[in-house]
Image (cartoon, grey):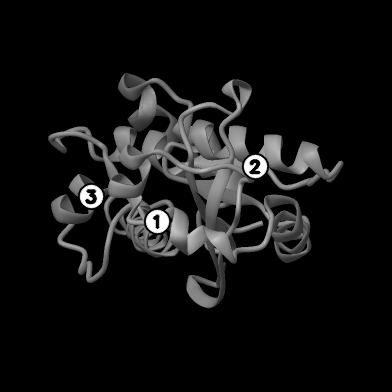
Amino acid sequence: MLANTLIILDFETTGLSPTMGDRAIEIGAVRLQDGKIIDSFQELMNPGFDVDTFIENYTGITNEMLTDARSCESVMKDFGDYIGGDNLVAHNASFDQRFLDAEFEEISHQYSGEFVCSMLLARRLYQESPNHQLGTLIQYKNITAKGDFHRALFDAEMTSKLWLQMLTDLEDIHQVFEPTFSQVKKLSKTPKNKINAVIEKWCK
């Protein structure tokens, strides 16, 4: 499976850890097919309790906005159908995967796709970037951004632009043509000082 055909997702949540009782309050995702966004999924979800003022200010998602939103369980059932068995990408994927797994556990849903973290891949490809937060990388690569970070769909869209830029750079700079999902997953977990050696093997 090529790395340009998959789903890129982002959660906004009530806090940092589902093991501490935190829940998702928004899911946003875009589907890439052959390097193009062909559709998207976005919905607020009611966690069943009020979010605190910090989260309201950080995300712009207020308790009033969540009042009439569907429950996490209801939204995640639809999202499970949406992703099917596709591979998945998120920026700082360990965070999003924890919430995806926790919310799916609530509805006894399993998925077969694999995860790659765009932040880990960026740390290897863009070692000169000041940091590897999504907003910084968007600026570092001169990617157009019009919208509000920390809203799920916008973050997923920006991650998709960054992801496609990284695939382009793998081709243009490193001559890794049509990189596969397995290749980028391997790169994302390769020590920084061994990246060039791995890429050279692919290019022989």
Q: Is residue 144 visible?
A: yes
Q: Residue 2 appears at what percent x and percent y?
A: 60, 58
> Considering only vertical position in the picture, is 62 above or below 18?
below
> Considering only vertical position in the picture, is 48 above or below 85?
above
C-alpha gap between disc 2 and disc 3: 22 Å
Amino acid at the residue labelled 3? Gly
- Name the residue: 27% across, 52% down: 173
- Name the residue: 26% across, 68% down: 147
Q: Marks 1 and 2: in contact by CB < 8 Å?
A: no
> Considering only vertical position in the picture, is 18 above or below 175?
above
Circle nearer the N terminus (1, 3): 1
Label 2 crowding class (10 Å Cα cut-off): few <14, some 14-19, many 20+? many
Question: Which quadrant of the view contains residue 97?
Answer: top right
Residue for badge 1: 61
Question: Which quadrant of the view contains residue 172?
Answer: bottom left
Rendered-image quadrant of the N terminus = bottom right
Q: Is residue 98 left or right of residue 66?
A: right
Label 3 crowding class (10 Å Cα cut-off): few <14, some 14-19, many 20+? some
Q: Is residue 58 left or right of residue 3?
A: left
C-alpha gap between disc 2 and disc 1: 19 Å
Circle nearer the N terminus (2, 1): 1
Q: Residue 60 appears at what percent x and percent y?
A: 33, 56
Residue for badge 2: 100
Amino acid at the residue labelled 1? Ile
